[in-house]
Amino acid sequence: MKSRLARPAAMAAATLAAAVLGACATGPATGPMSFFITSVGSGNGANLGGLAGADAHCQKLAAAAGAGGKTWRAYLSVPGAFPNQANPAGVPSVHARDRIGGGPWFNAKGALIARDVAHLHNGNHLNKETGLDEKGQGIKGRGDTPNEHDILTGSRADGTAFAPQTDTTCKAWTSSTDGSAIVGHHDRIGPLPENWARSWNFSHQSAGCSQEALVRTGGAGRFYCFATN
């Protein structure tokens, strides 16, 4: 009799433990804003004032939306530099994935974007419905007028920088003339049903670095902002 009574209790304990572990694995389903797409760009094409200027833009927009108590960073990469006589050690790359903290990240309406860095780069919940600006407003995508789904990243699909031979960041986010930048599609839609067209951070290069070139490609100079804490 004792063993029969113990068996249901043990099963209940195991079920409870599994539920707790599952909750820990998935994390909270909602939370305060820790991710947004900038409602406006720099106004100077892909010249964001470098990474520091981009971070400051994120911080300013977040503060205006009542979330200035967090530390905000732009999801942008910058390639390094090869060793040379002047700098034998070279310059290491800056990877977007290493700049944004550990998550989880939620949009302005509290919807989960990603649990952590791994989830962000493999299976996140970012799309046209969840990719909101700091005010909780949507961003126009493919099929809208104008199409503004190109989001500046300068990054590979895994969130790392490219090799320095080709400009993929409009001269480390300081050029509004020469160069080009890698962009992603926040709405996960492109002209072809292929992986590059559905990528949120690595779809194609921009036509140039000026505001006009970014608009012509299908963007507006926007970028992603993440809270690191």
Image: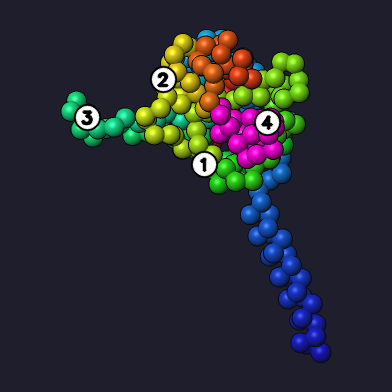
Q: In which quadrant will I find the N terminus?
A: bottom right
Q: How far apart are marks 3 and 4 (CA)?
A: 40 Å
Label 4: element kind:
loop
**Sequence-earlier tag: 2 or 3:** 3
| Foreground disc of the pair 2, 4 | 4
* Count of picture labels: 4
Q: Is residue 203 magenta?
A: yes
Real-space Cα separation, disc 3 to disc 1, in angstroms: 28 Å
Labelled pair 2, 4 in contact (Cβ < 8 Å): no
Q: Is residue 218 above or below residue 118?
A: above
- By secondary structure, the bulk of the magenta-drawn segment is best described as loop
Residue placed most toward the observer, 24 or 221: 221
Q: Is residue 35 visible?
A: no
Give the residue at x 71% y 44%.
Answer: 29
Residue displayed at 39% across by 34% down? 163
68 part of magenta stretch: no
**Residue 215 location, x and y as percent?**
61, 14
Residue 190: numbered disc:
4
Closer to viewer: mark 4 or mark 1: 4
* First in residue order: circle 3 vs circle 4: 3
Q: Is residue 8 visible in the rendered structure shown here? A: yes
**For the residue marked with disc 1, what is the amino acid?**
Asp
Q: Name the residue under label 3.
A: 84
Residue 65 is left or right of residue 50, and the answer is: right
The answer to which image quadrant residue 197 occupies is top right
What is the CA distance from the residue labelled 1 to the residue labelled 2? 21 Å
- Marks 3 and 1, the one that precedes in the sequence: 3
Sequence-first tag of 1 and 2: 1
Mark toward the viewer: 3 or 4:
4
Label 1 sits on residue: 158
